[in-house]
Image (cartoon, rainbow, N blue to C red):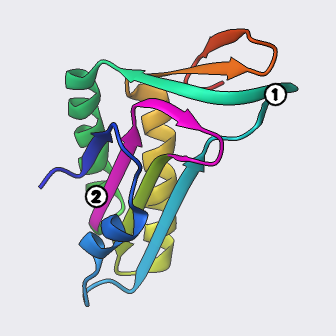
Amino acid sequence: MKRFRLSPVAIDGNALRAELQTHAAGGYASFEGWVREQHRGRAVRRLDYQAYETLALSEGEAIMEEARERFELIDLRCEHRLGTLELGEVAVWIGVAAAHRDAAFAGCRYVIDEIKRRVPIWKREHYADGDSGWIHPEG
């Protein structure tokens, strides 16, 4: 089963969490990134996400495996949206199951940081004034 996925439809965090449930885990951590209404003082109306899908999937899986090994995680998942997202929608979901909470928190943080840094997914913000702009992953 793939641990990193791209999705053109709404992310179901409950279904993804259910994939991680195991009696071996003593800790679980998750992160949801939401579309917010402001960025650097500008009113945002919606976002568009695009990806170089083949490379994004490959690099995303590599990050997931690095996190699994580095933090001794039992299992983990990440799903990132593509396409047009409205305010409040989930843009990215990450869930991590581990024997202990420290590993779950650290693994979850590692995944989001590395995805934003390394995975070729681009975000275009559409502003209230009619303008739009591409945002660097670290932006």
**Residue at the image position 32 percent from the left and 68 percent from the top:** 15
Name the residue type under label 1. Ala
Q: Point out residue 10 in the picture as x, y percentages from the top left corner.
A: 41, 49
Report the predominant secondary structure element of the magenta stretch: strand
Q: Secondary structure at mark 1?
A: strand
* Of residues 98 and 34, the one drawn nearer to the viewer in this rendering: 34
Q: Residue, x 79% and y 21% (percent of image)?
A: 128
Q: Is residue 11 left or right of residue 62?
A: right
Q: Which residue is mark 2?
A: 68
User: Mark 2 vs mark 1: which is more N-terminal?
Assistant: 1
Identify residue type, mark 2. Arg
Q: Which residues are magenta?
A: 75-90
In the rendered image, the quadrant that contains the N terminus is bottom left
User: Is 116 included in the stretch rendered in magenta?
Assistant: no
Exactly how many numbered labels are in the figure?
2
From what the image shows, is residue 129 above or below residue 88? above
Residue occupied by mark 1: 43
Q: Tell me residue 11's x, y (percent).
A: 40, 53
Indicate the quadrant containing the C terminus: top left, top right, bottom left or bottom right: top right
**Residue 96 x, y percent position in the rendering:** 38, 65
- Residue 125 - label: none
Q: Nearer the viewer, residue 135 or 14?
A: 14
Left or right placement of residue 119 versus residue 49 in this view = left
